[in-house]
Amino acid sequence: MNIRKKVNRMKLSETSYYRPDMAQESFQRRITMFGLFIIIVFSVLFARIWFMQIVSGGEYKKEAEGNRIREISLEAPRGRILDRSGDVLVKNRSSLAATVIPAEILKDEEVIKRLSRLLGIGEKDIKEKIEKSQDPNKRAVLIASDISEDEYTYIMEHQRELPGVNAEKKPVREYVYGSLAAHVIGYLGEISSESLEEKEGEKYQAGDEIGLDGVEAVYDEDLRGEVGKYKIEVDASGALVNDISIREPRSGYNLRLTIDKDAQMVVEEALKREMDLARTRYDPESGENYKATGGSAVVLNPRNGEIIAMASYPTLDLNKFVGGIDVKTWNELNDPKNNEPLSNKATMSELPPGSTFKVVTGLAALEEGTYTMESPFRCDNKYVKGAFEKTPKHCWSTHGNINLFTGIVQSCDIVFYEIGYDFYNRQINQEGRPLWDYSSDFNLGKKTGVDLASEYDGRVPNPEWKKQFNENNKEYQVWWPGDTVNMAIGQGDLLATPLQMAYLYAGLANDGKFIRPHLMKSLEDEDGKVQKEARKEVVSELTYDKEHLDQVSSALTEVVKGKGTAAKTFEGFPLNAIPVAGKTGTSEIISKQTTAWFVCYAPANDPKYVVAVAIEQGGHGGESAAPAARRILEGLFQIETQGEIPRSPGD
Amino acid sequence: MSRHKRKTEFSPGLVKPRNFKELLGHIPLRRIDKLLIMAAVGIALYGTLMIYSATHAGDNPLHYLQKQLIFLVIALIAMVLGTTFDYRKLMSYSRVIYGVSIILLLVVLVFPAKGGSHRWIPLLLFDLQPSELVKLAVIVMLATMITDRRSESCSNLDFLKALGIVLVPVFLVFVEPDLGTSISIFIIFLFMIIIGGARLKQVSVLGVGTIGAAAVLIQFGLLKTYQLNRLMVFIKPDLDPLHAGYNLTQSKIAIGSGQLFGKGLFQGTQTNLKFIPAHHTDFIFSVVGEELGFIGAAMLLGLFGLLIWRGFKIALTAKEPFGMMMATGILIMLFFQIMVNIGMAIGIMPVTGITLPFMSYGGSSLILNFFCVGLLVNIGMRRFPQGS
């Protein structure tokens, strides 16, 4: 080593002046060792700095940018929901809310404790909310909304003692009419992590409110608009230093529904009233009053598929969802004991349609050419033909001599047992089309495709379905004559939702053309300019003989008159001005009370509305459902209601 | 050999200078290590610039710059003073220097705390930090003891005496509290006695004892929570990235993001937006790394390297053991602080609050460090026979 040599040389040259002692030599040795250590340390420092700045400098640079630049979401006001004439059903109001920034609150027990005491929310709940939030760095987590003015001011004034806690003004939903059209509108809730993954793109972020049901869910993207982005440069304390860029938020579109607010009110009132009345009536079969566990009503324009009203009971007050529903209320809404107020019975109750289905059986028979409207039948209450010799089937009444036309009007079961049996035999011999194919012509067994978040398929049974359904029970796989015969009267395994039945009758009313039922009329921007408009969508068209359709229609207009099953109910109704074509139904579900149905359209000669009413465990069609339908029609055609509606004894 | 004997033996027998001119004549100017002085002054100017860059954003942009420049002037005077006397005289004053600095360490405790610790005695131009002075006192004291030792090897008694001398200031600084300086003093002691001839056995026992003492400190909660946290965070920075690990994380981000050329003077976002705390004192290196990049950091390391190398040379070639040990002590002090401070900024050393010599803002350390440079120059130029 150079220095060593120099030192040695020096030592030699300086001996005359100073002779280094032994200690000094050993010092030098150790100092040299120390020098080596210094070199190693400097190399390590140098290498580390090189690694940080040259090798991974890019990553650090990104982090530095992330430090410095903060993106603030500027919330876009959610679009309002209007009825068809522009009356506001759902709007936004400003709510005072308490939020926390998870990274800043840092699970600080003391702050959480204080916040809990201030807002009267459990510490556990607060922690849970913080932990549930996905992005712990940037977004504020909502802890409580609709806090009081005092609480708001307290938080604002005690920022120092409550680090990471913010009080802000947040727009929230306001449901002007509370529970009106609740199932159509749907509710909002915090986006779940699953749906956050599903919906990629920057439109949705953790903590966002999203429509979870009804049109709020279906039209969520249109309603929410576009979030604005405000990029700022901040210092370490989070204080603003510079504006970098801003993208203004775009408000969500207003959603104009096909729903008529006034009609909706009439429908809900009529339905509720009839359900309440049903509960006062005694059911001899079950030995107790009718329970009327659920009911729904749909009003549809058969010409263009617009849903004018849609009601479901029991219902719910949407305002309870504002700012996050509490657990207790949520559990109550989901409890089967309360008959599931959350579910929209109009699209989610799959029920046997009962006699309302007879129009399909009748039309099928006419189309097959096996029967005409005048074909004679004999009803002695009992049906004992062929396979039913030992296990006879019964009609609800004794109609004596009757034909297909009066069979529809008076809803005679024997007539349709006969037709059903004939369909069974023809199907065995592979003659003509089977009855289930006719059912499918009417779009049963599949979703109507209405613009709602939850809708069920219903069911059209056939031998193949039966085999699959009873995969593990061989003895149940056989398609018996009874299967077709039951189906002929809308029983057995046939299931339909009230909306599907309304849709079916709308097809009949519209000369066999099925127009997709829908709730959105248009989407409009802030200035009222239409951005999207519902288009009339023809789903299918019956290729049946026009005459047959007319014959069935005229039979339906007789149902509300004379000997018809709903004649009594429509006593005093101005049928001359507004002829009504309808059909009662009383369908049976094992171990439950009967479901009351009434489906109709009016005016029969130029249909404007289809009305379908179904009351589960509500008695007979003529006594529970038809009166509701009458009240609805009175509302729709602005006919003055006269006192108590007489009840038809049913079918 | 008694000290008296040695003193007369090594006394250059100089004629006492009668006036300033004569005094200058006694200084062997040719022997002055100009590179050493250039390195120190260079680093100090570099530091002043970085301090200005780190603090110019405030209400009074020149505040720190002005103060640091005043400190620098005082420091340069201190450096000159450090060269004007025969350093060997320090041997006879070692007890006085030691005693005075211990008294100051006691005095400082009665002055009000700033930022939670009693470190400063307010003076006219700057706040005196006795813990800086005590470092030099310990170096002088130990160098004297090692030089005076009767036998060539270190006896247990010598060792214990040295330990006792050091533990007093270590303790007093620790209670200020100033863990970093406390450890610094101990490290100076450790390296000096090893180089000064302590036996392996003694050092081993000391090592075991130190670990034991540290364990006791931690066990009985004598370390402040933040001190412990800093150490824990060093081991695992993700433990608490926003509190105790914050400084470390932000400093690393600052340096790393500087990349090759840096973001430019005054352009450091981490610095100017105050993501780095204490950016003009403990974390001045982060500012260099961020604003001047790898080039700037490497240049600074180079300057430090030059300084250490010159100091090293002086230590090796000093004419007699006291100078050798003095130079070594100063070298240890400077090197240790450089290593720990830069190591801390780049995340390979725990955050202990040790400043970067010649760079960090602060009067006491700058003045003391320049005085030490003066002493090094002093030792370096007196290795040659007078008048040669």
Image (spheres, coloured by chain):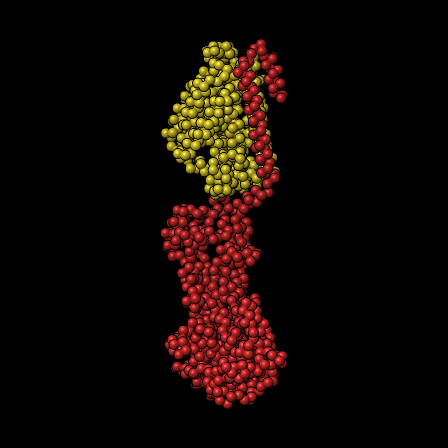
Chain colours: A red, B yellow
Q: A596 or A136: which is nearer to us?
A: A596
Image location (x, y in percent) of residue A154: 38, 51
- Residue, x 60% and y 83% (percent of image)? A367
Q: In this rendering, does residue A383 appear at all?
A: yes
Image location (x, y in percent) of residue B50: 54, 34
Q: A546 or B371: which is nearer to us?
A: A546
Residue A214 is left or right of residue B109, and the answer is right
Q: B192 or B98: which is nearer to us?
A: B192
The quarter of the rendered structure image containing the N terminus of chain A is top right
- Residue, x 51% and y 28% (percent of image)? B336
- Residue, x 60% and y 79% (percent of image)? A427
Image location (x, y in percent) of residue B362: 48, 31
Examine the image and state in which quarter residue A543 appears: bottom right
Seen in the picture, residue B217 relative to A4 is either above or below; the reply is below
Q: In this rendering, does residue A450 appear at all?
A: no
Q: A391 or A456: which is nearer to us?
A: A391
